[in-house]
């Protein structure tokens, strides 16, 4: 009896990036999970970086960190938020990882006597890794998202590997394409889709489904024209136009029968929806209709590209939903506050129900963030600091409350006489930049009576980290005596994980709690921050 074939879904792009392949991939995973189908996503990115750790957030978006210390593409944040699951680094493949392994194996002599080529050596390695992920996770289906666009040199070999995989296993190809409307003409244009489908077919791949991205509903004549050029029945061209929330996409695709079509195409035995799972998801989708709206000012250094803080944005939305309100995010470039007088700072930040300073690296914009933190403390506006936002909260308090006027971080001023923030001992002597920070999931012990302890409802937690600098223990007593509470430390007490103001709600953590926030399980720290911001906004509508 022949061995049952493994089942894969391969999601491909078209002529341009940024059209929502990650949302489509996450939605497919979510839809099939409603059938109790065990499915996980695997992402391929063609760049030659080993991982995302050394990439500029303003160019690539946020670096997402997993529990196992992996620094991965921001699409993994979307996957985890939709799937409500913790993923691992083996599900992230990059050109850098693949070529590194090929060269390493060649140097060891694994290919003695052979000419090492893209086909079959590289494509074979890719298939081995894909199949290993399928087997090790004991999946019913593995979804593979191919980053980049059709025709990219850097992803062509991966598409070839998927073509070869389809010769041996059950593979369904889903192409995501953009259908633009030229403003003057007002007509949905199919030519970009035609060209991308032709390119895909030249690579030997015939898509089984086409998901179209557009601003408005896909018109029926447009669907039929696309289907003709893609060699598909019109019902296999799935409309995925813009919606109010990305979390509505799974439901919208299910309304078009995409879930049942995929189950049938893969010949899956699990074909009945678990209504409890579906209803739970529907109840967690953020909805702004008819809700009180509060303004949260996010003061950062990468706000020109909102995707730099994608997880912060989503965590705020999740927290707002469970608090029964909606959030308007006021994205503020921290440099706007530098050199501004008090009246200008007040003008910029007035009306904020809460102020949040997220993570970041480098000296640019630091003084502006410090101004925002001082404003929040003095005006008693709820404050949440994340990673760099915690370090700057400590510096601001040291300068303006404890009287250490030159307090700073050695990251920004190596010769400061009051290094309230300093390089971690474990980081001294580290020269390589990639994958060398304090990364991944780390435990913390929360102090009794602290905001942190009350927020999490337990004394021991774990959160994800990504940093090199830390609160300098030499300043614990000096700052604590002036009212800065140490809300949590590592279990051995060696590193400060949380600090808090004691006369108003201000809390900061060295961790990145936004990375674990999901619609079905909002991050506790964000939930509590928004609860206080909601209360502040009601009492002080003009702050």
Image (cartoon, helix red, strand yellow):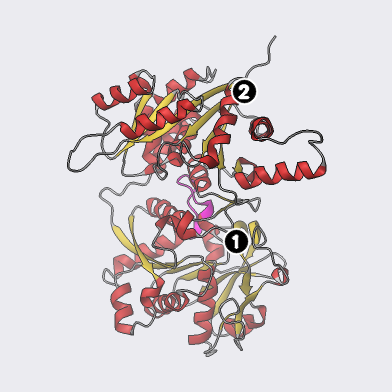
Residue at point 67%, 70% (across, down):
495
- Between 213 and 314, the residue placed more toward the observer is 213
Give the secondary structure at mark 1: strand
- Tell me the crowding category of disc 1: few under 14, some 14 to 19, or many 20 or more residues within 10 angstroms, Cα based: many
Q: Quadrant of residue 102?
A: top right
Q: From the viewer's perspective, is residue 177 above or below residue 334?
A: above
Magenta range:
515-525
Q: Return the x and y of residue 248 as percentages of the image width and height.
A: 36, 39
Q: Residue furthest top?
A: 1
Going from N to C along the chain, the mark reached first, 2 or 1, is 2
x and y percentages locating residue 208 in the rendered image: 45, 22
In the image, residue 541 above or below residue 33: below
Between 312 and 429, the residue placed more toward the observer is 429
Task: Work out whether residue 183 can be spotted.
Answer: yes
Q: Which residue is mark 2?
A: 6
- In-image side of 261 versus 496 (left or right): left
Label 2, residues with CA under 10 Å away: few <14, some 14-19, many ≥20: some
Please identify the dominant SS of the magenta region: loop
Residue at 53% across, 80% down: 395
Mark-to-mark CA distance, 2 and 1:
36 Å
Q: Is label 2 in a helix, a strand or a loop?
A: loop
Camera-nearest residue between 231 and 466: 231
Identify the residue at image location x=54%, y=68%: 361
Does residue 356 show up magenta in the picture? no
User: Residue visible at 31% across and 61% down?
Assistant: 294
Residue tagged 1: 466
**Residue 483, x across and y down, in percent:** 53, 81
Q: Is residue 523 magenta?
A: yes
Q: Which mark is residue 290?
A: none
């Amino acid at each position: 009896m022949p061995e049952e074939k493994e089942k894969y879904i391969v999601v491909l792009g078209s002529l341009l990036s940024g059209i929502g392949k990650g949302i489509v991939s996450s939605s497919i995973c979510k839809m099939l999970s409603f059938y109790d189908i065990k499915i996980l996503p695997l992402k391929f990115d063609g760049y030659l970086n080993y991982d995302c750790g050394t990439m500029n957030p303003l160019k690539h978006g946020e670096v997402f960190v997993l529990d196992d210390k992996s620094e991965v593409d921001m699409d993994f944040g979307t996957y985890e938020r939709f799937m409500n699951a913790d993923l691992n680094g083996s599900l992230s493949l990059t050109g850098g990882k693949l070529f590194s392994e090929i060269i390493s194996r060649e140097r060891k002599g694994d290919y003695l006597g052979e000419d090492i080529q893209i086909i079959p050596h590289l494509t074979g390695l890719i298939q081995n890794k894909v199949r290993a992920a399928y087997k090790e996770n004991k999946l019913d289906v593995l979804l593979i998202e191919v980053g980049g666009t059709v025709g990219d040199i850097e992803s062509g070999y991966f598409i070839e590997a998927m073509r070869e995989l389809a010769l041996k296993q059950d593979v369904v190809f889903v192409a995501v394409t953009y259908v633009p409307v030229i403003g003057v003409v007002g007509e949905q244009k199919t030519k970009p889709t035609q060209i991308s489908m032709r390119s895909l077919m030249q690579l030997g791949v015939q898509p089984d489904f086409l998901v179209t991205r557009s601003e408005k509903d896909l018109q029926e004549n447009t669907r039929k024209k696309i289907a003709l050029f893609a060699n598909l029945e019109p019902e296999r061209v799935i409309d995925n136009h813009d919606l109010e929330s990305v979390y509505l996409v799974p439901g919208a695709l299910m309304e078009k029968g995409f879930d049942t079509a995929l189950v049938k195409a893969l010949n899956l035995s699990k074909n009945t929806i678990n209504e409890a799972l579906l209803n739970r998801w529907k109840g967690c989708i953020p909805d702004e209709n008819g809700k009180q709206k509060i303004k949260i000012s996010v003061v950062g250094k990468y706000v020109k590209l909102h995707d730099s803080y994608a997880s912060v944005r989503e965590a705020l939305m999740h927290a707002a939903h469970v608090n029964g309100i909606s959030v308007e995010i006021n994205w503020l470039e921290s440099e706007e506050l530098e050199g501004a007088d008090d009246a200008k700072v007040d003008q910029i930040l007035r009306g904020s129900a809460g102020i949040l300073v997220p993570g970041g690296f480098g000296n640019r914009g630091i003084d502006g963030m410090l101004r925002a933190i001082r404003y929040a403390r003095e005006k008693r506006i709820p404050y949440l600091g994340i990673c760099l936002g915690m370090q700057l909260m400590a510096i601001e308090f040291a300068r303006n409350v404890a009287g250490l006027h030159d307090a700073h971080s050695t990251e920004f001023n190596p010769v400061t006489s009051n290094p309230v923030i300093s390089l971690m001992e474990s980081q001294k002597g580290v020269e390589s930049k990639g994958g060398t920070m304090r990364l991944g999931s780390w435990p913390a012990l929360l102090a009794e009576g602290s905001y942190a302890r009350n927020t999490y409802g337990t004394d021991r937690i774990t959160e994800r980290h990504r940093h090199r600098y830390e609160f300098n223990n030499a300043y614990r007593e000096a700052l604590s005596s002036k009212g800065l509470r140490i809300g949590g430390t590592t279990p051995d007490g060696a590193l400060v994980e949380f600090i808090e103001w004691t006369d108003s709600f201000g809390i900061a953590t060295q961790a990145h709690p936004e990375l674990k926030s999901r619609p079905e399980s909002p991050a506790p720290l964000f939930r509590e921050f928004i609860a206080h911001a909601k209360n502040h906004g009601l009492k002080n509508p003009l702050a």
